[in-house]
Amino acid sequence: MFKVMNDVELNKLIDRYFNAETTLEEEKILRNMLLSRSCLSNSQKEALAVMGYYAFNTKKKRIPIRLFSMYAAVIGAIILLVITFFIYPNDDQVAEVTCIAYVRGIEIRDKSKIMQLVAEQLSEMSIVSAEMTDEINNNFNDLRNVLNSEEL
């Protein structure tokens, strides 16, 4: 638990930190105070960066509904495949296996149509994965640029 400080007290502690006059306990309190705040002044951001914390794109991102729907469809397709191929009784127990899928409340019994839907969902998942990989690579590139500029 740490003491809640106003901006004046926090800025005094930051000044003491930069003058190497703080104890380890005070540095821990300072770090926790800075990390717990949502709005920081420039000097507070600088202290946090010096302490080794830096946040890229601090704006929280929400998952778009389309993306959420796509994930739900992929999960549904995977569950369908698991049920069809692993949980459903094998050919020794049942003479013929029936493949059934429900899409938006419509029953589909055509196995080729179901497999086509599964393939489409997996393809969309691959596209999203590539986009996420690109975004992660961009974030790492931004981090590398910041670290390289700090070395100068």
Image (tube, rainbow, N blue to C red):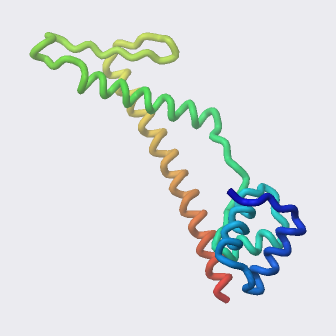
**Closer to the camera, 78 or 23?**
23
Which residue is drawn at the image coordinates 80% and 74% (left, top)?
13
**Closer to the camera, 44 or 78?**
44
Which residue is drawn at the image coordinates 73% and 53% (left, top)?
59
Q: Position of residue 85 (x, y in %)?
A: 24, 25
Q: Position of residue 50 (x, y in %)?
A: 69, 77
Location of residue 118 with respect to 142 vertically, above or below: above
- Quarter occupied by residue 77: top left
Location of residue 32 with respect to 47 vertically, above or below: above
Q: Quadrant of the N terminus?
A: bottom right
Q: Position of residue 118 (x, y in %)?
A: 39, 29
Q: Quadrant of the C terminus?
A: bottom right
Residue extending farthest to the left is 92
- Quarter occupied by residue 56: bottom right
> In screen coordinates, is 81 left or right of 24?
left
- Quarter occupied by residue 38: bottom right
